[in-house]
Each structure stands twice: as structure tokens, then as C-alpha cells.
Amino acid sequence: ETGVTQTPRHLVMGMTNKKSLKCEQHLGHNAMYWYKQSAKKPLELMFVYNFKEQTENNSVPSRFSPECPNSSHLFLHLHTLQPEDSALYLCASSPRTSGEETQYFGPGTRLLVL
Amino acid sequence: GESVGLHLPTLSVQEGDNSIINCAYSNSASDYFIWYKQESGKGPQFIIDIRSNMDKRQGQRVTVLLNKTVKHLSLQIAATQPGDSAVYFCAEKDRGAQKLVFGQGTRLTINP
């Protein structure tokens, strides 16, 4: 699990706050992903980056803004979130984005929006 | 449309028994399937995968079975141990896509 790290592990923020989630992978992978995991719902893919380029935006509201400065780091910038955005946000990485390569997940950031 | 779902949200088994977790999918174009395990406070962890040209694949204490005729996927865990307690997700990939679609998950609990 230390292959993909995420900080912070827990975050509480108000609807007017701006915060950022950080993900770092130490596996030498070229693809990175953000997922949202809500209670009693399947994992929802949010964004995909391949070689630092965004290749997928799964109709995510603009209050979520991803950033991938290099293949090892991925950020998710948050602003003016809503209470329904409270969830576990998971980062993952894989060698490429073929879909048939194992994605390695981080432990997630549990976000609570008040 | 594509959908991946699980027959049961929870499953309880006796320690030492075999566990079978089921998954149904509706996309006939799915060509790759994967099982993940998620323990409390952790991210999903890869267990085993299978491509559509196979019916069965075995790992260490786990077996995945794929029945394309009825679009059904199952994960069998032999001699279930307390450490197997977790939520298990199936996921599938469409032949023409590059992303995985995850099911809702089944919580497996082990009775001593």
C-alpha cells in the first residue's frame, strides 16, 4: 500500500473553503486516476491522467479541479464544495491506461463537507 | 447500457468454509473482469483478473469463474480466514474502452 500515498487522510471543510488533496505514487507508473467512493454506491471514476495529460473527465463538476504536474503526483483542488461531495476520494495508478492493467489504489482521503 | 452489480450486499460465512461472491454484468461487450478487496480504512487491493477468452482462473486460495452466457462472474475463496473480511468489488471493462466500471461491492464477514 505504500506504493500510492494520499494526504491528508481525513479532511473537514466548509462550503466556502479551498483545499487540495495530494496523491503520490512510487511505482513508476504513467497513469493516475481520481475516484469518488460514496456510501452504498459503486466507485465513480472522476479523472484520468496519462503521461501528465488528462484523458478522461467523467462529467465532474468544475468545483473539482485536478492537476498532474508529473507522472508521480496528482492533486485534486477543491473549492465551494457541497455537502453531497462528502465521500472517500481514492487515487490510483497503473503502468498505462489500457484498462487491463492493475490499478494500485492509495488509502484515500475521507472528506466531510459541512 | 453497461452496469455491474452484485447479487448480495452482505455475506457471512464460517471460518474455514468456502466463500462465493457473485457479480452480474449486462454489457455483452465486456472483455476483461477484475476483483478487488477493500479492507476497512484502506483502498481497494487487486485480487485476481480474467479475460473473456477464459472461463476460470485460479490464484492463491481464490478462483474466478466467468460465465459469458449468463453474464455472471464469481469469486471463490477457499478456507475463508478472518483476514478475508472486507468488501469485495467486481469491475469490468468494455472491449472498446479503457476504463473500469465497478460494482457496488459485497461485504464479507467471517464468523469464528
Image: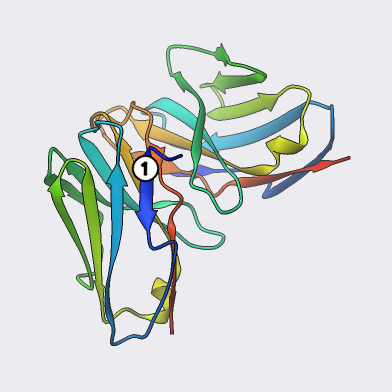
Q: Report x, y in % for residue A44.
A: 39, 53
Front position in the image: B69 or B9: B9
Left or right, residue B57 beside residue A29: right
* In the depicted structure, whether residue B75 falls above or below residue B100: above
Kindly identify which residue carries mark 1. A4
Question: Which amino acid does the dot numbered 1 rest on?
Answer: Val
Residue lying at 21% horizontally and 42% vertically, measured from the top left: A72
Q: Quadrant of the C terminus of chain B?
A: top right
Residue lying at 84% horizontally and 33% vertically, measured from the top left: B15
Q: Quadrant of the N terminus of chain B?
A: top left
Residue lying at 56% horizontally and 21% vertically, measured from the top left: B67
Residue A59: tell me if it is visible. no
Left or right, residue B90 beside residue A114: right
User: Quadrant location of residue A104?
Assistant: top left
Left or right, residue B11 beside residue A43: right
Front position in the image: A81 or A41: A81
Chain of the residue on which disc 1 is drawn: A
Q: Report x, y in % for residue B72.
A: 57, 29
Badge 1, how many Cα within 10 Å: few under 14, some, many 20+? many
- Element at badge 1? strand
